Image: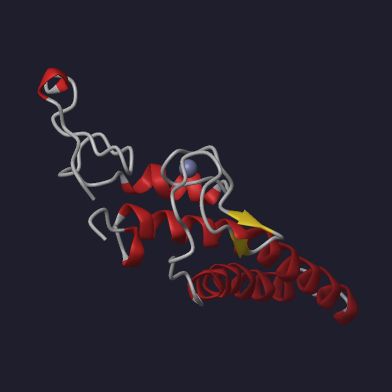
Amino acid sequence: MINHATSSHEDHTAAYDADTGDADTTQERARWPAIWRGWRGKCPRCGSGPVLHSYLKVNADCTVCRQEFHHHRADDGPAYLTILIVGHLMAPLLHWSFVHWRPEPLTLFTIFSVGCVGLSLYLLPRLKGALIGFQWAKEMGGFARNS
Ligand SMILES: [Zn+2]
């Protein structure tokens, strides 16, 4: 990637990379805005284009800013984080409801199976987008600016 910095714009943007749109190629990308954009299913770079389609499939690139996503390495990360969160919420809740409420076994099973599946389906695409946003911000894998 070639740095297209021009001397006339140096007072506003010290360096501008025309390929990535990053204002300053030496500065780190902001991590939390990228994670939040990914959580909302949006491109971590521009916040407009969708990252995912068909629930969990990652788009090859952003339709707005052309940021490539195909080289992401989310892999099992979103599933791991989903199990981590759902498990740590549901296990104490199951214990609490059994001790204090003690409903019929079928009632308990129905509520917790629907709760687990529903929460997992809610979290999985959001955590996948957030993880891709994190990878983009940390320039992991193909998200590096000089690759
Ligand atoms: Zn974009």
Residue 2, percent across and down? 20, 46
Q: Residue at x 45, y 55 (%)?
A: 68
Write down the quadrant of residue 118 in the picture.
bottom right
Q: Position of 142 compared to 75: left or right?
A: left
| Residue that extends furthest to the bottom in the rendered view of this protein | 105
Residue 76's place in the image compared with 14, above or below, is below
Residue 4, percent across and down? 20, 36
**Which quadrant would the C terminus be assigned to in this image?**
bottom left
Q: Position of 112 compared to 52: left or right?
A: right
Write down the quadrant of residue 124 in the picture.
bottom right
Q: Residue at x 33, y 52 (%)?
A: 137
Residue 34's place in the image compared with 132, above or below, is above
Q: Residue at x 18, y 20 (%)?
A: 12
Q: Nearer the viewer, residue 68 or 51?
A: 68
Q: Residue at x 61, y 60 (%)?
A: 125
Residue 134, percent across and down? 38, 57
Residue 111, percent across and down? 82, 68
